[in-house]
Amino acid sequence: MEKRWVESPPVDTEIIHQLADQLNITTIIAGLLVSRGVTSFDEAKDFFRPCLSHLHDPFLMKDMEKAVLRIEQAIAQNEKILVYGDYDVDGTTSVSLVYSFLRTQYPAIDFYIPDRYKEGYGISFQGIDWAHTHGFSLIIALDCGIKSIDKVEYARSRQIDFIICDHHLPGETLPDALAVLDPKRADCEYPFKELSGCGIGFKLVQAYCQKNDIPLEQITHLLDLVVVSIASDLVPVTGENRTLSYFGLKQLNENPRPGLKALMELAGKLKDITVTDIVFFIGPRINAAGRIDDAEHAVELLISESDTIAYGHSQVVNTKNSERKEFDQNITLEAFAMLDNDEQQLHRKSTVLYNPTWHKGVIGIVASRLLDRYYRPTIILTESNGMASGSARSVNGYDIYKAIELCGDLLEQFGGHKYAAGLTLKPENVEAFKARFEEIVSSTIEERSLLQEIEIESELRLSDITPKFFRILQQIAPFGPENMRPVFLSKGVISPGELHVVGKVNSNHLKFSVMQEDSFRFECIGFGLGAFKDKIIPYQPFDICYTIEENVWKDKVNVQLNIKDIRV
């Protein structure tokens, strides 16, 4: 697929040179910092040296005082507290964090994860009935609940109070819960709006500790869960999230909880864990439990207190992940065939596919795979409980949630974000929805949004990649949304040796080396770029855009260029 190379808009060169002089760094590194809002020595100090004191006062969050008082009241009156969360990574890490902390303070605690297939996303009537039957009078809902107005009202009728900890965008009316913790609510003045659901859970725990004179250092071990949620839920790695991620990765690499350590062992990586490692190796395994079977397996793993117990739970979770991979691969190939064999699909601006036999647990992954290949707003639907249920993924710059909202009269329910959403509709409405969605996308999307962009931060000569340059570049991490690993452009490079196509499955990755006349030779890997093997002629110049990463192979460490695209 052709990709559009977009160079970042220029930043103030005077500020760049001042910062470079103050910090004794290159203007290229200084430019990366300025583009991230770091313009002074003091700001750079805070950026490069995150500190727990940078965390905001949790009581700045609306309703936090009410939430802590209600938990204290429940403990004082020996009430049963239920920690309730969604079945994805953010939900299960949230539940694991709050549950594992509260049970150190009080024994009458349990957790509940709704069944993806029987109950669906978020708070369910079935979950509330379960809580009532088992004598719970307080539910702490994590990573869900901000739109559960009817569910919270139903719980009140059964003498159950709700504390909602959510990070999704609220509707016009908030649920009538005892406390609603969500920085995105219009009347909340909390200074950072982009916490993950698990991040909100951590702020609740932080507030409880602050109120009860428990030192912050006693709960920093919980941050390994927070960074897993931040990485997996793709929230911005800026501001408070960057601080939480920094210390979460520190915990994950130095002393991870048994459950996460077991997952790291399964992934074959026990040190130097990064946000990318979480996204590709840890998050999918946690997610697989809820996709294929029951997300309670994931929580049991994450709250395990010994390596032996964690190992047992990790084997269950890993088996589910293997099943998830098989479903994912088979359905993806079926979806590719449906699109490639349909002449009309070639001219569409959107993709909507429906197959009632597809496994509901992997349709979100399949939607992402189709997005990568065809790059247009994509919705994959299957049948669940007699309804067509689907996952949506969008291209850069296009709000798929708004497009789905404009089809609201054809839907039973929907929710989500600008780039990812979920929806449910009657099977008989699928064809009408397909037509309406295509019409809306065609009339509202810009052509440029249908061409995948590579945003290039700076042009670079290969000779600029020195050990000092790379060492400082690594300190811009943790990388993630809004603080992505910088993409560089180098023009007129040559390949002095052979090019190899590698890969376990499709053999579609390009392995080669590059240099310029004044540089060392750098090893390169281009994932999905195998088609360039016959286009690059040794010693003939071409252009590359790439990220600079550390590659570890058989205990040997070297700097490697991860090639994003090539122009011959």
Image (cartoon, grey):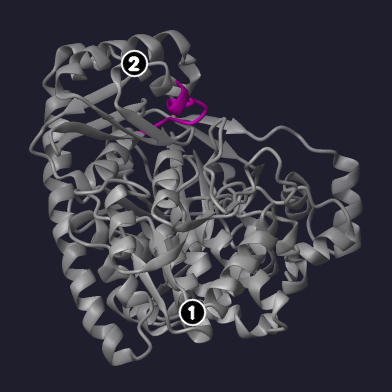
**Dominant secondary structure of the magenta stretch?**
loop
Can you give x and y, in whole percent of width and height, for residue 184 in the image? 62, 43
Residue 78's disc number: 1
Whether residue 465 is situated above or below residue 153 in the rendered picture:
below
Residue 267's disc number: none
Can you give x and y, in whole percent of width and height, for residue 136 in the image? 39, 67
Residue 409's disc number: 2
Can you give x and y, in whole percent of width and height, for residue 451 in the image? 43, 24
* Residue stretch in magenta: 393-402
Q: Amino acid at mark 2?
A: Asp
Left or right: 435, with 105 as reference point: left
Q: Residue at x 88, y 55 (%)?
A: 40
Q: Residues within 10 Å of mark 1 (few under 14, many from 20)?
A: few
* In magenta stretch: residue 400: yes
* In magenta stretch: residue 4: no
Residue furthest out toward the left? 357
